[in-house]
Image (spheres, rainbow, N blue to C red):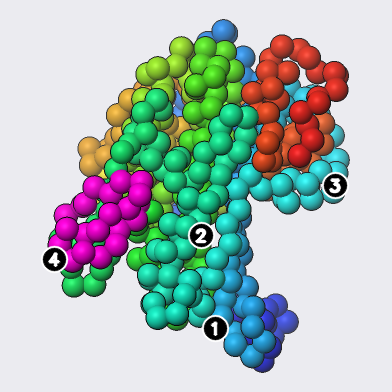
């Protein structure tokens, strides 16, 4: 936690410089275990490494030439002079259309177009803002109730508006709890009212909300997210806002995939790669959405020709990435190698004696470690066609069970480092000709179809934000 200045801002680097040095000095004298520093004995990994050439050849009828990349950000800020506890928050999810073949041809040229970056960053497909701490929806309520009321309001008001997909976040939440062609009528809510004796039994809550049958307290469908449980009266509640942001990112993915599933299931959907910035995961209080996402997208797989939809998360930091980089540095895995991360690998990386617990509450895709053609190491998360990626029996380590994996690795090889260096969208947008930020009113189908049909070079009349 940074020090706070008198004006309510945060004091950062300069005064903390000596503190950083002190902590480093303390750490140097301490004894602890860092898994990524202990990879000397790697013989046991050998039979978990598969050259990409050993994997099934990507279905040649699959032509992943377009990608839709989804990325989010959030920020909290003190907004009252002299009252640093009054904090306002902003969260957004942005999406970009990425032309993979243009990116492929441009990957050697590492130019940066600041205008394109600025455009991508400011073109949010959905944005939310709300008082997050020290300020309330109305007088006389605590911070939990305030967040609950505001989330209900925001989820009804905020829409993902692309093409004929004109759906509110609440519509998309109901969709995620149902199937691609049949949104759920209710979502399960544990009564959040203090002292309510039914709080362990989920109550079905319809779109309009309902009264708790036990305590008569008001229940809203967004209560199913349990984000209010992450909120406290003290602090900035930045973590809760981060949870909200990750939910919104997932709902944008639901919206864009369902749009293509409904309107071009046999053509544009199976030729588009959907990329999430970060792993396919849901952390913390809304983690139950993990299982919903798995069920929803697997239902989409069942009803889509071929192996699609093609979904992947690209992770760029964390223990797995650190470990993967060490493996490459020590030549344990080489160019074109895929490391299957089974229970033994997870036990080593997560430093746990109980690796079967890893991931089953969090991830709806499985992590792999891959060393791309250009030598860069990637940690993609990929969804299994059926069943859980992780469960108490070790889940499905792969590569069997992941029919989309070969085509996804192929895209990673073709686009090289440009795809995942420092976050998906800014880098994609840096290749100005390869990316187009998706905003309100964008015709996503047309963006994808233009490439598919080879209409490049013709003016795009839909490209005005
Ligand atoms: Zn109740």
Instruction: Specify whether residue 202 is painted magenta.
Output: yes
Q: Which residue is mark 1?
A: 85
Asked if disc 4 and disc 3 are in contact, CB closer than 8 Å, the reply is: no
Q: Is residue 270 left or right of residue 227?
A: right
Q: Which residue is mark 2?
A: 242
Q: Quadrant of residue 290?
A: top left
Q: Position of residue 420 (x, y in %)?
A: 65, 40
User: CA gap, disc 4 to disc 3?
Assistant: 55 Å
Instruction: Establish whether ligand 1 lies closer than 8 Å to the Cβ of label 4.
Output: yes
User: CA gap, disc 1 to disc 4?
Assistant: 33 Å
Q: Is residue 319 above or below residue 383?
A: below
Q: Which residue is mark 4?
A: 197
Badge 2 density bin: few <14, some 14–19, many ≥20, Cα 10 Å? many
Q: Nearer the viewer, mark 4 or mark 3?
A: 4
Q: Is residue 288 left or right of residue 125?
A: left
Badge 3 density bin: few <14, some 14–19, many ≥20, Cα 10 Å? few
């Amino acid at each position: 936690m940074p020090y706070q200045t008198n004006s309510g801002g945060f004091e950062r680097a300069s005064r903390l410089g000596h503190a950083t040095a002190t902590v480093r000095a303390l750490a140097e004298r301490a004894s602890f275990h860092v898994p990524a520093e202990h990879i000397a004995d790697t013989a046991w990994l050998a039979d978990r490494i598969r050259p990409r050439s050993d994997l099934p050849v990507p279905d040649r009828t699959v032509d992943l030439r377009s990608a839709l990349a989804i990325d989010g950000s959030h920020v909290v800020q003190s907004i009252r002079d002299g009252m640093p506890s009054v904090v306002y928050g902003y969260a957004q999810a942005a999406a970009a259309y990425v032309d993979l073949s243009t990116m492929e041809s441009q990957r050697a040229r590492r130019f940066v177009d600041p205008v394109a970056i600025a455009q991508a960053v400011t073109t949010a497909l959905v944005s939310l803002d709300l008082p997050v701490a020290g300020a309330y929806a109305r007088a006389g309520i605590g911070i939990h109730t305030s967040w609950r009321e505001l989330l209900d309001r925001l989820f009804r008001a905020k829409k993902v508006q692309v093409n004929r997909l004109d759906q509110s976040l609440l519509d998309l939440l109901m969709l995620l709890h149902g199937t691609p062609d049949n949104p759920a009528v209710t979502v399960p809510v544990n009564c959040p009212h203090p002292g309510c004796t039914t709080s362990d039994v989920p109550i079905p809550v319809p779109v309009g909300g309902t009264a708790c049958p036990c305590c008569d307290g008001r229940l809203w469908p967004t209560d199913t997210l349990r984000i209010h449980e992450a909120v406290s009266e003290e602090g900035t509640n930045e973590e809760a806002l981060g949870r909200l942001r990750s939910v919104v990112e997932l709902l944008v993915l639901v919206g864009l995939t369902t749009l293509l599933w409904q309107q071009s299931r046999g053509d544009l959907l199976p030729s588009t790669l959907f990329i999430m910035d970060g792993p396919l995961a849901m952390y913390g209080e809304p983690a139950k959405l993990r299982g919903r996402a798995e069920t929803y997208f697997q239902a989409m797989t069942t009803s889509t020709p071929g192996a699609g939809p093609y979904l992947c998360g690209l992770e760029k930091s964390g223990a797995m990435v650190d470990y993967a980089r060490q493996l490459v540095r020590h030549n344990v895995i080489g160019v074109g190698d895929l490391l299957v991360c089974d229970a033994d690998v997870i036990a080593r990386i997560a430093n746990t004696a109980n690796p079967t617990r890893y991931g089953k509450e969090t991830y709806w895709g499985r992590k792999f470690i891959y060393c791309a053609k250009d030598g860069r190491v990637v940690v993609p998360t990929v969804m299994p066609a059926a069943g859980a990626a992780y469960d108490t029996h070790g889940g499905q380590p792969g590569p069997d069970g992941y029919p989309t994996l070969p085509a996804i690795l192929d895209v990673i090889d073709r686009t090289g480092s440009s795809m995942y260096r420092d976050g998906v969208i800014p880098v994609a947008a840096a290749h100005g000709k390869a990316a187009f930020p998706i905003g309100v009113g964008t015709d996503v189908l047309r963006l994808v179809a233009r490439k598919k049909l080879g209409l490049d070079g013709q003016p795009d009349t839909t490209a005005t934000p």
